């Protein structure tokens, strides 16, 4: 399956599918994954690359490394499932485009559930008129949820609630108002701040604020109070990074020159907005959060 003419020109006239099925690469995949699973892996990665022209422009080795990390975590690269993404990023310090590994909020949920530590885990948007009160000290929330799903979906969001309960009964909960989440996004996302300043909508915070908020809530509550399995720790540490062939990681923000302004073009973007490039073509199905 050929992916892109410009891709072939940039990387020695070799298509990505040819790269993956070359003997040396295929042997490496089979050694790490296995024969039958290796072919499934190759097919799924080629499919993901073929549907994203920007990803097809990345150095092949970085695509493979990101995909191998996802495979090691037993997560699917399908954008429709929203577990993890191989996201194109302009490495301006080296003058190249690389694929970064970005964990979706559904990936966080999958890994947390799979760990066996959690009896319950959830994250939800609280809509206007639903919140009765939230007790910060006791972490008790009282809400009157809108019963009509269609009405609820079209009602403005006023906050976000995340919680988990361990198998032993210990519980933790957290609520952030939307204004607090907005302040967080503006502080930690250069691209979103640029969007707000210039009236653009390049970043995923601008395109799917609730989705990004879900991921933020899960990252906050799990990293601060949750038990993290080895897989979850690995995913957390690798999130928003380019994974080298030797397993080392370089984070997106370290590949931006000081003079770069994230979000100006929609291609050079910052660490919390990596998914934005994936959805520049309008494909957004099945995703929430960065």
Image (cartoon, rainbow, N blue to C red):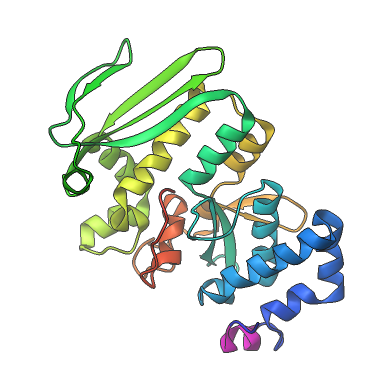
Residue at the farthest left position: 129
Residue 271, how many percent across, how many down? 47, 51
The answer to whether one can see residue 186 in this image is: yes
The answer to whether one can see residue 58 in this image is: no
Q: Is residue 282 above or below residue 223?
A: below
Residue 278, by quadrant, is bottom left
Residue 102, how many percent across, how many down? 53, 52
Residue at the farthest front position: 148
- Most foreground residue, 196 or 290: 290
Q: Residue at (71%, 62%) from the top-left corner?
A: 41
Q: Is residue 108 above or below residue 48?
A: above
Principal SS element in the magenta part?
Answer: helix
Residue range corresponding to the magenta coloring: 4-10
| Quadrant occupied by the N terminus | bottom right
Residue 26, how many percent across, how many down? 82, 69
In reply to whether residue 12 is colored magenta, the answer given is: no
Residue 77, by quadrant, is bottom right
Q: Is residue 155 left or right of residue 106?
A: left
Q: Residue at (50%, 52%) from the top-left corner?
A: 253
Q: How many marks?
A: 0
Residue 198, how many percent across, how many down? 22, 63
Q: Is residue 209 above or below residue 119?
A: below
Q: Is residue 87 above or below residue 248?
A: below
Q: Is residue 271 left or right of residue 200?
A: right
- Most foreground residue, 20 or 257: 20
Q: Residue at (56%, 33%) from the top-left corner?
A: 112
Q: Is residue 34 left or right of residue 242?
A: right
């Amino acid at each position: 399956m050929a992916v892109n003419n410009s891709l072939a020109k940039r990387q020695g006239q070799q298509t990505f599918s040819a790269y993956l099925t070359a003997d040396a690469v295929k042997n490496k995949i089979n050694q790490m994954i296995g024969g039958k699973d290796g072919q499934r892996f190759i097919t799924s990665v080629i499919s993901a690359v073929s549907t994203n022209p920007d990803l097809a422009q990345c150095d092949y080795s970085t695509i493979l490394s990101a995909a191998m990390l996802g495979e090691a975590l037993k997560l699917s690269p399908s954008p429709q499932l929203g577990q993890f993404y191989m996201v194109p990023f302009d490495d301006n310090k080296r003058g190249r485009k690389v694929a970064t590994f970005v964990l979706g909020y559904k990936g966080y949920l999958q890994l947390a559930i799979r760990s066996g530590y959690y009896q319950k885990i959830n994250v939800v948007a609280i809509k206007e008129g639903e919140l009765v009160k939230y007790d910060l000290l006791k972490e008790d929330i009282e809400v009157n949820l809108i019963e009509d799903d269609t009405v609820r979906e079209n009602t403005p969001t006023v906050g976000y609630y995340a919680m988990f309960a361990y198998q032993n009964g210990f519980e933790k909960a957290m609520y952030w108002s939307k204004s607090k989440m907005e302040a967080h996004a503006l502080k930690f996302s250069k691209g979103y701040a640029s969007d707000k300043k210039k009236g653009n909508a390049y970043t995923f915070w601008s395109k799917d604020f609730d989705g990004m908020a879900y991921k933020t809530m899960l990252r906050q509550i799990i990293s601060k109070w949750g038990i993290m399995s080895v897989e979850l720790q690995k995913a957390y540490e690798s999130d928003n990074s380019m994974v080298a062939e030797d397993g080392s990681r370089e984070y997106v923000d370290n590949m931006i020159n000081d003079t770069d302004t994230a979000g100006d073009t929609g291609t050079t973007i910052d660490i919390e907005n990596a998914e934005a490039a994936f959805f520049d073509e309008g494909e957004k199905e099945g995703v929430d959060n960065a």
